[in-house]
Amino acid sequence: MKENTAIGIKDLHKQFGDQKVLDGINLDIERGKITVIIGKSGGGKSVLLKHLIGLVKPDKGEIWVDGLDIVKLNEKELNETRKKFGMLFQEAALFDSMNVYDNVAFPLREHTKLSEKAIERAVEEKLKRVGLLAFGEKMSSELSGGMRKRVGLARALIMDPDIVLFDEPTSALDPVISVTIEDLIRETQTHFQKTYVVISHDILGMFRIADKVAMLSNGRIVAEGSPNEVRRSNNEMVQEFMRAVKMPALSGGNYA
Amino acid sequence: MFENLLQRIISPVENIFREFGSIGLMFYQSIYWMFRRPFKFDYILKQMEFVGLNSVLVVVITGVFTGMVLALQSYHGFRKFGSEGLVGMTVALSITRELGPVLTALMVTGRAGSAMAAELGTMRVTEQIDALMVMALNPIKYLVAPRIIASFIMLPLLTIIADFVGIVGGYIVGVKLLGINEGAYINKTIQYLDLDDIYNGLIKAAVFGVILSVVSCYKGFYTSGGAEGVGRATTEAVVVSSVSILISDYVLTSIMF
């Protein structure tokens, strides 16, 4: 495994019933970069992401994080590795029994012995970074989709994790809010210099913020590299994606 | 043909046993996590409030009217033999041994068991349970164990209330409304009602508390299929809990009395 690899995925297989979801994934995720895994909806992206943090066990294959194959770890060892991760879920997965402040403070309260004062400082710093400092008292049910994602991001970052996973960060958001979330992902990554792994089908938005792109198709990685390299790839799947997002006005199409 | 038929008989039975196995496994894990630090007292207290305190009113109403109707029914029966004095004893024994614990458990299942399944089910389908796991926190410890402990403690306490108000309800109907001799009513009750009757009823209640919380949490915890799945889990939690309570009541009674 190369020195700058944060997560090394080797020959990962997963099958649900007769359906092969992951069919031999090989991918090295670079440390301190944003890696975006692009693929069709229902194409196994979420399943792949859940493997990285041990929520799903593979049928076969290895996932190396800091010199440990997390597939082979027991629950206790796995939890030690999980502390290096943060995750932003698709619908943010905020605890609806708690307000925004308590949601963000929760991991600190459970895992550290910090004083309430120190927790308050940490939570306010993170809430400020996502632009929601004034919303600490709100319950998660009172927030819009975009705000929930921002709180989810603050919570994912609160333990200063080495690796942050994003499950479809811009799905179900309008284009304007999507852009602000993308910018926030880019900004926080530039600031904290952590490893970000994003899965998405939003190829346009993600090419804007990605350092590396990997294309997932039929359970395999069919193209990977910088956004420009992937854009120029001859792979059929990549081309299909690129065609689908070309807007008439931008491509000078025949829709006048 | 024959194999097919055999398969159709065996597979539902197999499913039932598999489910009982999974429920048992969850109970075992909960017990394991109950005794691991740090203890989640605030979570347990919150659940005790929800399962116990918030059920008091419904348990009181159930208890009073059960005691009242028992007195009314048994009065009409006993009057034919001129032994109205036995009404008090009948009410007290029926309530403390059977109706107190069973009806309390069924009411709490309807009120709190359904809510447990719906709450955990919603947390499952909105990935809140996954979020706990990603934070390296065990969801059984945070979500399931406190509910089981709370139910185990609160069901006997609620049953004491049900027993008390049930007996009072019987007294009001028997003595005040139907005019049974007060001395006979109270004497017979004290003469035939042993503390063991009450204790055994409370043991039953504790067992029912464990059953309804484990089953409801299990159904919620393993929900799948969005909002529809949550609805299904809630219904199944109430049905399976109630049936299990009634079956285990027979088993417990046959052992105890």
Image (tube, grey):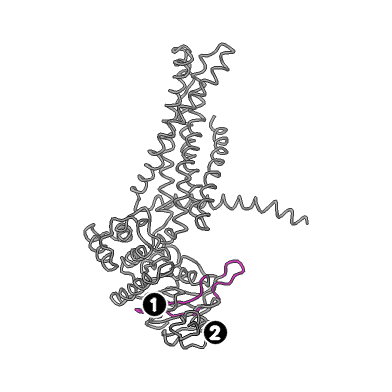
Q: Residue A234: x percent and y percent?
A: 51, 88
- Of pointers 2 and 1, the one earlier in the residue sequence: 1
User: Magenta stretch?
Assistant: A15-41
Which residue is more in the foreground, B150 or B233? B233
Asked whether the residues under the numbered discs 2 and 1 touch, taking CB atoms below 8 Å apart as contact, a structural biologist would say: no
Query: Which dot marks residue A6?
Result: 1
- Mark 1 lies on a secondary structure that is strand
Which residue is more in the foreground, B180 or A65? B180
Above or below A149: residue B108: above
Q: Residue B238: x percent and y percent?
A: 52, 44
Above or below A131: residue B151: above
Q: Is residue A230 left or right of residue A183?
A: right
Identify the residue shown where x is 36% and y is 61%: A144
For badge 1, the amino acid type reads: Ala
- Of the 4 image quadrants, the one containing the N terminus of chain A is bottom left
Q: Residue furthest front?
A: A256
Res A60 → quadrant: bottom right
According to the picture, the residue beneath numbered tag 2 turns out to be A236
Which residue is more in the foreground, A25 or A64? A25
For badge 2, the amino acid type reads: Glu
Crowding around mark 1 (Cα neighbors within 10 Å: few <14, some 14 to 19, many 20+) is many
Alpha carbon separation for disc pair 2 and 1: 29 Å
Classified by dominant secondary structure, the portion drawn in magenta counts as strand
